[in-house]
Amino acid sequence: MIIVTGGAGFIGSNLVYRLNKLGISDILIVDNLKNSLKHKNLNNLKFLDYIDKDDFMIKLNLFKKVDIIFHQGACSNTMETDGRYMMKNNFEYSKNIFHHCLENKIRFIYASSASVYGDGKKGFIEDERYEYPLNIYAFSKFLFDNYVRKYLTTLKINNLIVENKKKKHIKTRKSTQIIGLRYFNVFGPQENHKDKMASTVFHFYNQIKKDNKMKLFTGSNNFLRDFIYIDDIVDINLFFMNNPSISGIFNCGTGKPNSFFNIASIIQKNYPESQIEYIPFPDELKGKYQTYTAADITNLRNCGYKNTFTSLEEGIKKYLKCLEENQGYLEKD
């Protein structure tokens, strides 16, 4: 059985959808449907059962015979200011699942975030020297990555010991796979429920439908982000699922930053009558906003991931088609 936490969310539901395409439906979805709009993300999925995230934690010891847990669930609101809630929901909750996986030899693939790099002035390499979170969401991800790193170091040492023992023909126990994926700016179907945290493409499309204008922050020409289409994120998750011997923390981006203005320009080609309107940059985001991200994907490539990434133009084209034809939801198989 496979467990997907956050399975009713944006990335989690896309992952389940692709697993279904591979003929896999023995899946337990863990989520919180307090935001009832998220149920629409589940309508076209095939899965064994659903359980609320709090109930899952209470009954965690019942789920020992599991192949892999894709831990995608988290509070992803970068504007959340309740640090106690964020740490309990993103850090403590993740630790409990992580230790359950270690104790029961369950493979663990979890969602981290590019937000751990902060302003990015030092670069975007999976190393503590480059990390300095700017908000409590980013800090919760940063802290869990550092927590996991302690075990990855031990795992690396153990693997060296295992290798030596193999040469001496001593029987050894296989290590548990641990993968952390630092998502950059992901966009695509199934993010309708995310409200302010939905992608720029989603917001621009809805702004056009409402009053034929796309609203950009003043200075958006100079705000560059590494935008990656959801299909590529799912591909990376499945790559590690199919390569259980690999462990580590990896950036998940294209390595090619684009401006918000560039996104608006691409969308404008599809809606030539639309206009661009500049609005003041919000005071509450000053000092907490990443104006530049660009994933260093050297480690991802070095571990064998060879796929070509969807271009920004192609990703936007696919997503706009989905928004027009299916209101932003995945098609029924």
Image: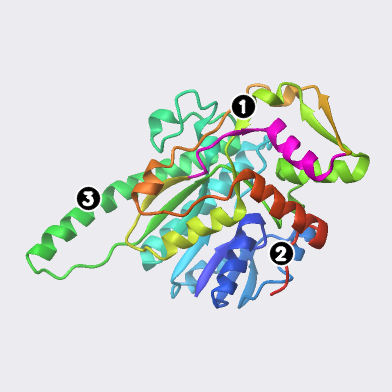
* Residue 80 screen position, x and y as percent: 68, 38
How is the rendered protein coloured? rainbow
Count numbered badges in the picture. 3
Q: Is disc 1 in contact with disc 3, using a CB cutoff of under 8 Å?
A: no
On the rendered structure, is 4 left or right of 279? left
Q: Return the x and y of residue 261 as percentages of the image width and height.
A: 71, 31
Dot 2 lies on which element?
loop
Residue 323 locus on image (x, y percent): 79, 55
Point out the residue furthest to the right here. Answer: 211
Q: Which residue is mark 2?
A: 330
Taking the image as shown, residue 189 lies to the left or right of residue 22, namely right
Provide the residue designation for mark 3: 157
Lower sequence index among marks 1 and 2: 1
- For label 1, the residue is 291
Instruction: Give the quarter of the image for residue 119.
Output: top right
In contact (CB < 8 Å): disc 3 and disc 2: no
Among the two numbered marks 1 and 3 on one chain, the one whose residue lies closer to the N terminus: 3
> Can residue 333 be found in the magenta stretch?
no
Q: Quadrant of the C terminus?
A: bottom right
How far is disc 3 from disc 2 in space, using C-alphas?
A: 43 Å
Residue 23 visible: yes
Judging depth in this view, the residue of 171 and 304 nearest the camera is: 304
Front: mark 1 or 3: 1
